[in-house]
Amino acid sequence: MPVRRLTKHAAHLEVTAFINVIVVLVPFLLSTAVFSHLAVLELSLPAKNSGAAEQLKVDDLKLEIVIRPDAIEVGDRIGGLIQRFNNTPQGYDLAGLSALLQQIKAKYPNTKAASVLAQPTTAYDVLVQVMDTLREVRPPGTAAKAPSFELFPDISIGDAPMSVVKK
């Protein structure tokens, strides 16, 4: 009696659906990758004090901007408060802050570092606006595409000290 053997056919892979997915997916991923550029600012946290006294220079400026709910305080960590800008009806006085920062930059042209100290309840938008004001200034009366001048680009952020309540 003859033996009957089954003939097996090679399986064919159906890749048409996979190719259709790739054809749609690749252009989509490429197009979204082009528009997902993020603006990143280099920030650093204030250094931890090691308990040793800092070596201070006469012309050394340790600029601090403290954001309070009712005002912005500009000060020197060494010399104390420089100026306080109370809120206007429109919000924080960023124009006055910018003018003062330009005067400080004229007096200390080599200083690039500043600290922004904010309270935990400070709005993110306010923090970004203050950091933008601190980083650069655009000359008044110029076009939006005019070059801006660098003020204090090395920004450190931290927590604001508690305000003293006067009785």
Image (cartoon, rainbow, N blue to C red):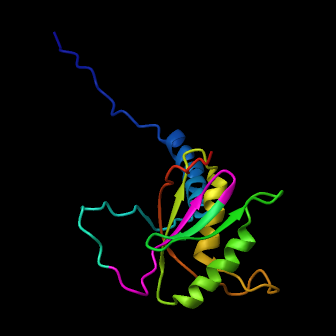
Residue extending furthest toward the top: 1
Along the line of sight, which residue is nearer the eye, 134 or 24?
A: 134
Quick check: 12 above or below 112? above
Query: Is 33 in the magenta?
Result: no
Q: Nearer the viewer, residue 4 or 13?
A: 13
If the image is split into quadrants, where does the C terminus sit? top right
**Image position of 101 with respect to 1: above or below:** below
The answer to which image quadrant residue 140 occupies is: bottom right
Q: Quadrant of residue 48?
A: bottom left
Where's residue 125, x and y in %? 66, 55
**Residue ID at (80%, 84%):** 143
Q: Is residue 97 left or right of residue 142?
A: left
Whether residue 158 is visible here, answered yes or no, is yes
Residue 24, image x and y in percent?
Answer: 60, 49
Percent of width and height locating residue 115? 49, 67
- Quarter holding the N terminus is top left
Horizontal and vertical percent position of residue 7: 28, 25
In percent of the image, x 46 and y 79: which residue is there?
61
Which image quadrant is residue 53 in?
A: bottom left
Above or below, comparing residue 81 to residue 136 in the picture: above
Examine the residues drawn in magenta and state their main secondary structure.
Answer: loop
Q: Which region of the structure is painted magenta? A: 56-71
Q: How many marks?
A: 0
Residue 150 visible at all: no
Specify whether residue 61 is painted magenta.
yes
Name the outermost residue toward the front.
Answer: 167
Which residue is pictured at 48% across the width and 74% down the height?
A: 79
